[in-house]
Each structure stands twice: as C-alpha cells, then as structure tokens.
Amino acid sequence: MTSRPPDSAAPRRTTNILLLIIRFLVSGGLLTYLIWKANPASIWATWQQADLRLLALAALIQVLCIAISALKWGVLLRAHNQQQPYSWLLGIYFVGQFANNFLPTSVGGDAIRIVQLGRRIGSYAQSSASVFMERLTGFLALSLIANVALLITSTDLLGARLVNEPTLTLLALGFTLVAVAAVAASFSAPWLLRRFHRYLPKTARKPLQSIASSLGIYAADRGAMIRAMGLSLLFHTLWIGLHYVCGLALHIQAPLLLFALMVPLTDIVGLAPIFVNNLGAREMVFTLYLSQIGVMSGTALALAFTAFTVRLTVSSLGGLVLLFGGASMRGATGADTTTSTEPSGPRH
C-alpha cells in the first residue's frame, strides 16, 4: 500500500481560512461596536425619512462610475493595439464588481478580468498589465484627491479646518508614496528585469519578461496615461458625488469638501487586509468626521450603510451578466479580436 503524499496546499488553505476569520472578526467587531455606541434607533429613523429619488440618482451615478472604469480599461488596452468591444469590457467589469462586493476579497474581480481578457486576446501578460495599470491609475487619482483635501482641511484654506487624525494623514501620505513608487517600477519594469533577471528562477524569467514589456509600453504612451488619469479623476469625483447625494437623501447638511476627504480616506483605509469590503473602516471614518460638524453617530452610520447598499445593489447587476451573458462573457478564441502573445508597440 503506497502512502499518500502530503497535501502541500493544506497549510495554505488553513492560513487563508484563518486570515478570513480575522478579517470578519475585525470588520464585524468594529461595526458592532460603532452600532452599539450609537443609538440604533436613530439609524432606522434616518432611513425612514430618506428621499428615494435621490437614492435612485446615487444608483445611476454608481452605474456611470463602472461605465467610466470600463472605458478607461479600453483606453489602456488600446496602448497594446488591443481594440475590444466596449459592451464586452463593460459586462466583464460588472462581473468583476459583483465578485469584489459579494466575495470576501477586493481583488477577486481583477482576477476574473485578467483571466477572461487573457483568454480573449491570447496574452495574459497584456491582460495583467492592463488590469494592474487600470487599478494603479485609480490609486494615484485617489491619493491626489485625498492629499488635496487633507491640505485644505488641515489648514485655514477656504475656511474649512477640521481635526484630522495623524494616523489617517500618515496613511494617506504613505499610500501616495507607494502608488508613485509602483508607477515608477511599472514604467521601468523592462530595465529592472534586465538588471536583475539573473537573480530570478529560470522558469519565471519568460513570463516576467512578457509582463515587464507590457507594463513598459505605458511609459512610452503618454496619451493613454493622460486619458487614463483623467478618467480616474472623473471616476473618483463622481464616487464622492455619489456619497454626497446619499447624504442629501438622508437630509445630512455637510459640505462637499468633507465628502472629498472622507470618501478617499475610507477607500485608503479599507485597502488594509483586515477589513471585508471596507466594512468597519467606512463607518469609523464617517463617524469621526461627521461628528465634527454636529452629525449624530447614528446618522453617520446610516449614511455609510446607505452608500454601501447602493454599491451592492448596482454591483449585483454583474450577477445577472454572469447568469445571462453566456458564452459572450467567456474568453473568445475566435478571430474577432486582435490577438498577440507578445507585447506590441505603443499606439499613439
């Protein structure tokens, strides 16, 4: 009787399960504490007077945000001479949003997009590079808005001084430095790989070469990067506007500048791997800042829950796309796309 080899994946699965449990405990514990500290009845009272028309407008803004993200993805793909139908990119983006919001991870949707696009165009390197750069330009725009809002509210500029937690300020600055460093590393990826390839395992050199070359193309295509950054700034402006509209729907009188600070900080804090879908982080930041203008904690929590519900509702459309999209949502292998297994030159 032969012995069964040990399952090398078992320790990894155990670790992933433990990390998932920790994330749920942190998000759930913080959320429970904030609700307990506030008056739960005030949350329900705030919801009862919500303006449904404004909430419908917030949902439309969320749809527009996803549409802009899909458009930006297409812009980055064209830098690789990959012209994909916008309807397909939009459908897959909805599927990715569905995965991000209904699975206990914020990158599952990116993995879906990479796999589906990689099958469709025949190049996982270009697929990975486009999704990575789509995310990265969003992070840059997010950090830019957060730092401008922090500068304004930490001084007497525009007469809108607020008490900013040093930890959140340092976190925003650190996030900006990481985002800038990631852009620099992406643009110089081909040079870095040539410089250090001898230190890499031989089996990893070829796939890394393809990815590095795909990332390096963006350094040469300034037009694509400028358009992508413009769309990223538009996305985050609308995302902030969505929260502002939700605030109006709940009759919260707060300046737009406050939302321009709270929303980016929430997204930055929520990137920490101890939260599930920003739960806990969003409510903490909203309570911290809205309390400074006299908004009760129960009302702040109602706003955080409302914005989250709008996002969940719209992202659930991705489930319908996945259910009824059929073969059109799976990677195509036909000749209807421009396929290439090697990175192509920049398109200007």
Image: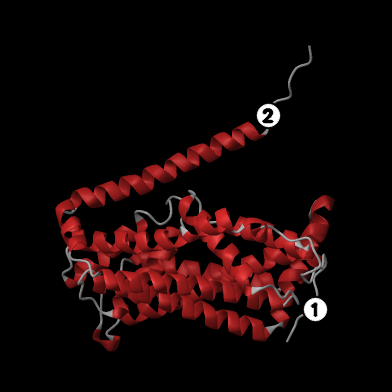
**Nearest the eye: 91 or 140:** 91
Picture coordinates of residue 339, whole percent (x, y): 80, 68
Q: Is residue 143 visible?
A: no
Mark 2, other Cα within 10 Å: few <14 / some 14–19 / many ≥20: few
**Nearest the eye: 284 or 84:** 84
Image: 7 above or below 101: above
Q: Is residue 100 visible?
A: yes
Mark 1, other Cα within 10 Å: few <14 / some 14–19 / many ≥20: some
Residue occupying the far top of the picture: 1
Picture coordinates of residue 251, whole percent (x, y): 20, 72
Residue at left 30%, top 59%? Answer: 305
Instruction: Quadrant for residue 72, please give it.
Output: bottom right
Q: Is residue 47 left or right of residue 224?
A: left
Element type at mark 1: loop
Residue at left 54%, top 72%? Answer: 69
> Tags 2 and 1 in contact by the CB under 8 Å rule?
no
Q: How many marks?
A: 2
Q: Amino acid at mark 2?
A: Asp
Determine which residue is flagged by label 1. 345
Of the residues under marks 2 and 1, which one precedes in the sequence? Answer: 2
Image: 94 above or below 142: above
Determine which residue is flagged by label 2. 7
Question: Which quadrant of the rendered structure holds the N terminus?
Answer: top right
**Nearest the eye: 54 or 152:** 54
Name the mark on residue 223. none
Element type at mark 2: loop
Q: Is residue 220 left or right of residue 290?
A: right
Q: Amino acid at mark 1?
A: Gly
